[in-house]
Image (spheres, rainbow, N blue to C red):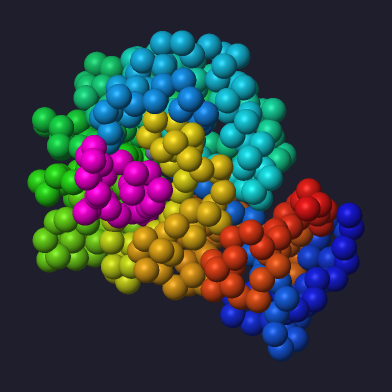
């Protein structure tokens, strides 16, 4: 369906009329009065795991928490084939497409020196989806593997050849600083972006984030390093948290918060309600000047058995979990991840491609209140939504 005018749209705190000409936005005019729809740029998800997607029914974890999920996944992984990976990744992207996602960065487990099958399959899937959803691949190695003086260089060279992002799981490892220093040296050598899973637990002694921030500043990699999770910040002393967040802001290390997976995995003990939610202090991070992003992380797998690659659902979960003002955090699923991933900002503005979501709601509190409000996904001026 082709539409040329969208009247009474809520955009960044004002009511506007959006005119379309073909695939472009030809005008955005403030009109005042109440809004009938909320408009936002197409979202970007900076942190997912497409290799693990849609495995939950065949490998439910025997034990709760992060390490129970890792064990369940390790068993399932032995059955992964190119066909299985391609099928599950395509299911995930079909959901993301319907939800309006325009770009995603997927971590891929990388467990030995040679690139895993899933890395290559996602490369093929990215070609399938080219022009629809932009896909980035990030290697997810254990710090002991990528930080190994013999193995790390071979992995980094393969990641560089395939245009990927280098990354590691970092959590209270022995010789953490030495291994991280080697990874940073490899990133500088190959000009690679870095993306870490860091301090994903509730150990008050976890200091991976502190080390990554210091190394980012030392190597001058401002704007090139992402840190996901940082759950331990939720239980560390406030003065320490303030110091590391200030340092992260100065070094321009961005923080990705994954509210659904953290709430599901942290403080997860059988027969007992959780007391600790493992959510990084995102309000304090933003106040300190850290760029904060929101991601889905795991979907329909042992790490999180629910979800559908819907950034608006993640935004809604974060609003509740972290007591956020909804409108003030829309950027965490749109412009902030776009910038962190090196993409165009994707604005709803004159001269931009007509790529946006319209939700039939009056404002952001209304969007949060009525998750079933109709949503229309426009790509290049065409409404791709299924009529309800
Ligand atoms: Zn993750």
Image quadrant where residue 147 sits: top left
Give the magenta part as a residue range: 253-279
Comparing 371 with 33, the one in front is 371
Quadrant location of the N terminus in the rendered image: bottom right
Q: Give the residue at x 28% y 17%.
A: 151
Residue 263 sits inside the magenta stretch: yes
Comparing 162 with 53, the one in front is 53
Q: Where is residue 189 drawn, in percent x and y?
A: 35, 32
Q: Give the residue at x 43% y 64%.
A: 319
How many discs mark residues in the rendered view?
A: 0
Residue 275 sits inside the magenta stretch: yes
Q: Residue lying at the far bottom in this picture: please name it.
A: 33
Q: Give the residue at x 12% y 49%.
A: 204
Query: Could one spot residue 303 in this view of the protein?
Result: yes
Image quadrant where residue 63 sits: top left
Image quadrant where residue 352 sits: bottom right
10 on left or right of 79? right
Q: Where is residue 48 drawn, in percent x and y?
A: 47, 39
Image quadrant of ligand 1? top left
Q: Give the residue at x 29% y 68%.
A: 284
Q: Where is residue 17 drawn, in percent x and y?
A: 78, 77
Comparing 140 with 54, the one in front is 54
207 versus 237 height, above or below = above
35 on left or right of 111? right
Comparing 378 with 223, the one in front is 378
Q: Residue lying at the far front in this picture: please name it.
A: 271
Q: Where is residue 299 drawn, in percent x and y?
A: 48, 37
332 on left or right of 248? right
Query: Could one spot residue 123 in this view of the protein?
Result: no
């Amino acid at each position: 369906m082709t539409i040329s005018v969208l009247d009474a749209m809520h955009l960044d705190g004002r009511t506007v009329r959006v005119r379309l000409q073909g695939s472009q936005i030809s005008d955005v005019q403030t009109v005042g009065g109440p809004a009938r729809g909320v408009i936002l740029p197409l979202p970007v998800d900076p942190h997912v795991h497409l290799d693990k997607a849609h495995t939950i029914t065949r490998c439910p974890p025997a034990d709760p928490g992060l390490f129970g999920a890792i064990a369940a996944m390790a068993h399932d992984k032995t059955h992964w084939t190119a066909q299985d990976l391609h099928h599950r990744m395509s299911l995930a992207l079909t959901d993301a497409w319907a939800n309006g996602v325009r770009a995603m960065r997927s971590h891929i487990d990388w467990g030995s020196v040679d690139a895993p099958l899933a890395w290559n399959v996602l490369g093929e899937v990215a070609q399938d989806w080219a022009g629809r959803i932009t896909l980035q691949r990030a290697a997810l190695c254990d710090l002991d593997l990528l930080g190994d003086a013999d193995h790390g260089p071979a992995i980094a060279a393969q990641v560089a050849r395939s245009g990927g992002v280098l990354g590691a799981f970092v959590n209270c490892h022995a010789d953490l600083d030495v291994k991280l220093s080697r990874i940073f040296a490899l990133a500088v050598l190959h000009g690679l972006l870095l993306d870490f899973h860091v301090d994903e637990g509730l150990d008050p002694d976890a200091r991976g984030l502190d080390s990554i921030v210091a190394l980012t500043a030392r190597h001058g990699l401002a704007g090139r390093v992402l840190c996901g999770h940082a759950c331990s910040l939720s239980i560390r002393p406030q003065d320490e948290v303030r110091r590391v967040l200030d340092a992260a802001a100065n070094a321009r290390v961005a923080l990705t918060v994954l509210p659904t997976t953290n709430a599901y995995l942290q403080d997860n003990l059988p027969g007992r309600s959780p007391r600790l939610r493992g959510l990084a202090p995102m309000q304090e991070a933003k106040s300190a000047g850290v760029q904060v992003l929101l991601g889905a992380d795991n979907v329909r797998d042992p790490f999180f058995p629910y979800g559908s690659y819907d950034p608006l659902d993640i935004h809604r979960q974060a609003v509740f979990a972290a007591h956020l003002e909804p409108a003030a955090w829309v950027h965490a699923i749109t412009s902030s991840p776009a910038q962190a991933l090196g993409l165009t900002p994707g604005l709803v503005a004159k001269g931009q491609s007509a790529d946006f979501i319209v939700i039939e709601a009056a404002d952001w509190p209304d969007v949060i209140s009525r998750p079933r409000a109709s949503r229309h996904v426009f790509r290049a001026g065409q409404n791709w939504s299924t009529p309800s």
